[in-house]
Amino acid sequence: MTQAQHGGWIPVRKDFVDLDTRCHARAATGRHHGFPDGRAYILRDARGDEYPFGEACARAAVLHPEVLEQVPDYTERDVVRQADALDAVIASASRRRPTSADRDAAQRLAAIRYLVLRMEKVAAVPRVQPTVRFAPLQDVYEQFQRSGDLGRAQVSRILAIERSPATPPRLRATNLLDVYTAHVKLERLIAASNRLDNIRFLRGLHDWLARQLVLSAAQIAAAGIEMHPQAFSAAGVWGPDDARPSDSGQLF
Ligand SMILES: [Zn+2]
């Protein structure tokens, strides 16, 4: 994946983009379309610069469209439209049985995503809890930044850390994806709001998210963000008895 592709475009990830972002590819009309759902494929050119593409444009830019399925998806816990979810179920049902190479590839993607979420994306959230950036992952993160890839031993080590009983549930992969998704959505709302009291309220929720790495159902509803139905509800996230404070009505 890291070697130069046709046209020099290398798929890097699927990620959230700012709502005013335009696709890098120029459509036949000469116009650059936007991303109404706020998600894009990020492709890297031969010089190492990254640009956003819509799915069809990304498919056209790379030699083998399958490579787009071999990038980490940081938007996976976003809410998806019913029709898209159904398409994905049908597509996966019609797919052949996974080979050991498929499983290796899936593990590699899971390791990259966990490493980047923990050391970069969630670590960069303002005022985030300092336990997110994990010193034992620093050397492998720096190697990944240089090479753009992970060796088999590094993949195993990262996945072992993610699954370790010593890793708090709020620092596991799915919860960090939920934190990143909620962070992006709250920042979008804050940027779009022009009411000071509303901005203050949303900033308060964002600070809570950064410190606690969770939002309750009441907080999600009060913010008015749309999250995955199972967001912040992984095992152990609310403590040993998983008492999720969704009905208490208290926001902080
Ligand atoms: Zn496009």
Image (tube, rainbow, N blue to C red):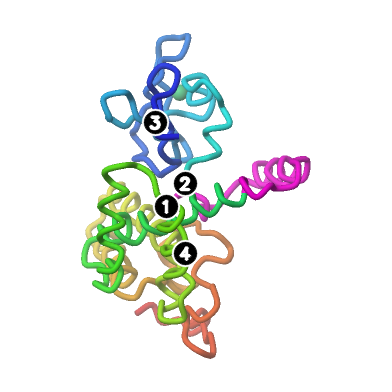
Which residue is painted at 68% across and 47% down in the image?
A: 99
Question: Which residue was labeled with disc 2?
Answer: 72
Q: Amino acid at mark 2?
A: Pro
Q: Residue 243: where, in percent of width, then height?
A: 52, 87
Residue 93, by quadrant, is: top right
Q: Amino acid at mark 4?
A: Leu
- In magenta, the rendered stretch is 74-102
The residue carrying pointer 1 sits among few (fewer than 14), some (14 to 19) or many (20 or more) residues within 10 Å by Cα, namely: many
Please tell me whether mark 3 sits on a helix, a strand or a loop. strand
Say which label, 2 or 3, has the lower sequence index: 3
Residue 220, by quadrant, is: bottom left
Q: How far apart in space, not on screen, are marks 4 and 3 (Cα)?
A: 25 Å
Q: Is 127 placed above or below 77 here?
A: below
In the picture, measured across the screen, residue 201 lies left or right of residue 160, that is left
Q: Is mark 3 within 8 Å of ligand 1?
A: no
Question: Which residue was labeled with disc 1?
Answer: 112
State ligand 1's quadrant. top left
Question: Which residue was labeled with disc 3?
Answer: 43
Please tell me whether mark 1 sits on a helix, a strand or a loop. helix
Please tell me whether mark 4 sits on a helix, a strand or a loop. helix
Which residue is painted at 41% across and 19% down in the image?
A: 25
